[in-house]
Amino acid sequence: MKVPIESDEIKDEAAQAEPVNDAEIAADAAADAAEPELDPDEEAARVAEAIRRGEEAAEKELASDAGKLRAERDELAKKLAAVDDDIAAAKKQAADASERLVRLQADWDNYRRRTAAERLAEKERAAENLVLALLPVIDDMERAIEHAGATEGDEQLTHFVEGIEAVHAKMVGVLAKEGVEVIDPVGEPFEPLSHQAVGRVEDKDAYDETVAQVYQKGYRMGQKVIRTAMVTVTFGGPKRPAPEPEGEPGADEAK
């Protein structure tokens, strides 16, 4: 078996390392025990200084935390202000949209009413034009009936006149269903808006400005006079009394 051979360097290091002396350890312990104890006031001052330093450190830490919290609060306040501005802008946009919607609805309602009125007016104009085109035919039929009425004794002519009268009555009835009213004002007061005076007749027995004769009948469609009646008007008679106002007190008692 081989025996390890120690080198010279290892031998020197072992020789230099001295064993620990128990006497030295005891001397160090005695030196430590020989140190003087601290005065109670000095110890209290050290404790107070330590507490002060701890409080300062805590205060600095609290101040730092408070600064951070204030910064966060200011940032949140800015964000909240921005949100409030967005909400206000959104509310304004909603109000503007509602106002535009109301105006649009009003414009649409006006448009519908206007177009409906225009269609109705166009329909009335078309019906009026048709009636005006038929009126000369009715006039000719009435003249033919009036002229044939003077002829008597001819049975065939009588039947022919009766047929014309039936057609005339049917046409007038159709027009009446469409709201066409005949203006035949014999014996009625003269009205310039619906009568056209083509002559004057002296009649002292009739009220002044009374329709004496109708040369051509007029026609009214709804509330509109589409053709005035051609009439003669009396003069020289007494003035027509003014009509009594409706609902006059004592009118019912007088009756």
Image (cartoon, helix red, strand yellow):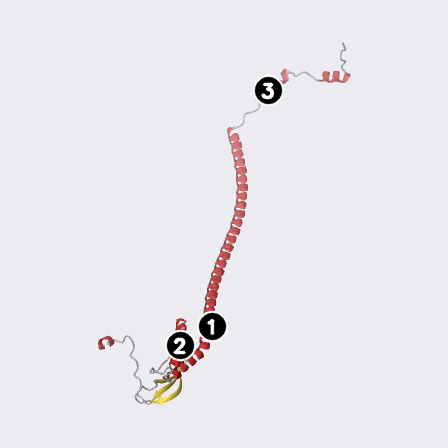
Q: Position of residue 42 (x, y in %)?
A: 53, 30
Q: Which residue is mark 1?
A: 126
Q: Is residue 19 left or right of residue 247?
A: right
Residues at marks 3 and 2, CA–CA distance in whole angstroms: 160 Å
Q: Quadrant of residue 3?
A: top right
Image quadrant where one finds the C terminus: bottom left
Q: At 36% from the left edge and 86% from the top edge, which residue is drawn?
A: 233
Query: 10 or 184, which is in the foreground?
Result: 184
Residue type at mark 2 is Gly
Res 40 label = none
Query: In the image, is 92 to the left or to the right of 211?
Result: right
Looking at the rendered image, the quarter that the N terminus falls into is top right
Q: Earlier in the sequence, mark 1 or mark 2?
A: 1
Three-letter residue code for mark 1: Ala
Tell me whether the residue at label 1 lies in contact with that at label 2, contact meaning CB atoms closer than 8 angstroms: no
Q: What amino acid type is highlighted by mark number 3? A: Ala
The residue sitting at 61% across, 20% down in the picture is 28
Tell how many labels.
3
Asked which secondary structure carries label 2, the reply is helix
Judging by the rendered image, the residue that carries numbered circle 2 is 163
Secondary element at image label 3? helix
Q: Quadrant of residue 239?
A: bottom left
Return the mark for residue 29: 3
Q: Is residue 9 visible?
A: yes
Residue nearer the viewer, 55 or 73 = 73
3 or 1: mark nearer the eye: 1
